[in-house]
Image (cartoon, coloured by chain):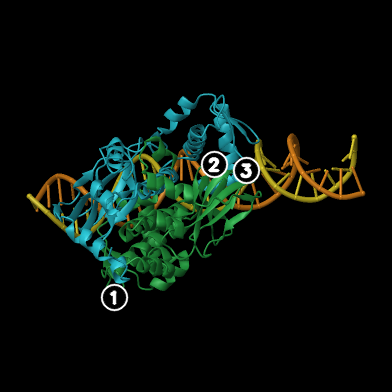
Chain colours: A cyan, B green, C orange, D yellow
Amino acid sequence: MRGLSIQGALSPEDKAVLLGLELNPRHMSASEVLWQESAVADLFCVVKEGWAYSYRNLKNGSKQILKFYLPGDIVGIRDFGFTRRLSSASMINKGVIYPFSYQQLFELFGRSNLAVGIMATAMRQQALLSERLIYLGKYSAHEQLAHFLYEIYLRLKRIGDVEDNSFLMPLTQELISDALGMSPVHVSRTFSMLREEGLVIRDRQHVKLPDPEALARLVEFNDSYIDELLPPTFSELLRARL
Amino acid sequence: MRGLSIQGALSPEDKAVLLGLELNPRHMSASEVLWQESAVADLFCVVKEGWAYSYRNLKNGSKQILKFYLPGDIVGIRDFGFTRRLSSASMINKGVIYPFSYQQLFELFGRSNLAVGIMATAMRQQALLSERLIYLGKYSAHEQLAHFLYEIYLRLKRIGDVEDNSFLMPLTQELISDALGMSPVHVSRTFSMLREEGLVIRDRQHVKLPDPEALARLVEFNDSYIDELLPPTFSELLRARL
DNA sequence: CGGTAGGTTGAAAACTATCAATGAACGTGG
DNA sequence: CCACGTTCATTGATAGTTTTCAACCTACCG
């Protein structure tokens, strides 16, 4: 919050809240893990010394790093609004971190449950962005396009725009190519492959996924980030305020 | 906020705030631009009908799409906390959107300037993620690594860990390869190229950028997302509350 | 002193981009 | 209703980038 302080934007109450936070410096050794993906998400950390990084382990054995954290950075707000961690986090070298619970973050938000909701919504968007990054980094065009289509399918399904595994997708292959970072020509070829495998049927804007589960298996889809429900502990806290 | 409503987590005040928002549906035609990158950022939109997308125009003439927005999605919170847009946004087909000003978002945050700060911090992280996505998608290993190193350089400089254009980077080439989505072997080769061009000198963890400006030109670095200052209008609003 | 982790280099294979040509669908105006 | 231009999609051939596999080297650490 140094930025806000510099700009004189913190009220006495804000400052009191900040100063009232218990600082429990935790000394970390090199390579020490902060948390593993799918662990329960209940805190974030400010890095005081040392470097850290967040990453996702991939099915092919490698991993995709999402971000490096330098001193002063905050690790783990990305999972705010989720029940479980979407990615692992680990130290690179030895250092010191200050953990804060999401509950403390709640209190920082004051009385407004709406603010919590907005924050959670924003973090959900970031989760989608992270997933795309993961696929851009380490997967072939084939898996990327499959993942992309399955994501669209789930998002449309959530708002009731999927019927009989079919939906309307007003995207040209050029737009898709600009999203997935490949050439339009290759998008076309990849669509052909998916069609030959019986995974995707497409006629102009009409897309049908005959076997969504097969697609999901192909891309190992983690659909927790599509789900809009807040974790149970969140709901309790939010209701407790009413 | 449907999710919060479902969970019964909204207080009467929250609901009053929501219902008090003026809804000004705006009808958009296909391909109509919501905003261009580096335009002043002052609002976000909820998509009611139609699809939209946010993207970044690249120097090589193509563009990288960051996200597609479906009905119910929120376009443009990503720029909350920035003076100018980091990416353009545009409709795909025709549709309807509801614009809301960032000032309204402010008010949703209630009295807490801290909450605004946290939100802005989170959005800054998302901006970094977006930049990486852009480079993963459309740039060669050479430009990607250059961009990566320059980002680290700027972030370290901000916290005073750069001296004489040199800094300590405790990353192995394997970690870098996992971040940039390329093989460790290729990271090594790309480092060699940058060394031969006189752009990067590296000895184990010691990195020196003899000519940071040349690197910046190479990657067309947009450093606004590193900068931690909030836009002037923000500061005014925040101070007005004290 | 030897083991290990990290880095470099070479050659072959795989993947993807680019270029170019062709075809299908769609909207528009005559 | 048809002709036409435009956009979008497909296919083939070639070139370029990146990966993989392998060997080798160096610095560091017990």
Residue at x 45%, y 57% (from the top left corner): B104
Q: Is residue B106 visible?
A: yes
Residue type, label 1? Asp
Can you tell which mark lies on residue A206? none
Q: Which of the chains bears the disc numbered 1?
A: B
* Distance between the alpha carbons at the discs numbered 2 and 3: 18 Å
User: Is residue B205 at all visible to an observer of this figure?
Assistant: no
The secondary element bearing badge 2 is classed as loop
Would residue B32 appear left or right of B202 to someone viewing this image?
Answer: right
Nearest to viewer (mark 1 / mark 2): 2
Marks 1 and 3: which is nearer the front?
3
Residue indicated by mark 2: B71
| Residue at 44% across, 30% down | A216
Give the residue type at disc 3: Thr
SS type, badge 1: loop
Asked if labels 3 and 2 touch by Cβ distance under 8 angstroms, the answer is no
Q: Quadrant of the N terminus of chain A?
A: bottom left
Instruction: Check the image and report above or below for B105 versus B51.
Output: below
**Residue picked out by circle 3:** A172
- The quadrant of the rendering that contains the C terminus of chain A is top left
Mark linked to residue B164: 1
Residues marked 2 and 3, same chain: no
| Quarter of the figure with residue B230 | bottom left
Marked residue nearer the N-terminal end (1 or 2): 2
Chain letter of the residue carrying label 3: A
User: In the displayed structure, does residue B209 sit left or right of residue B36?
Assistant: left
Verify CB contact (< 8 Å) between mark 1 and mark 2.
no
**Number of marks in the rendered image:** 3
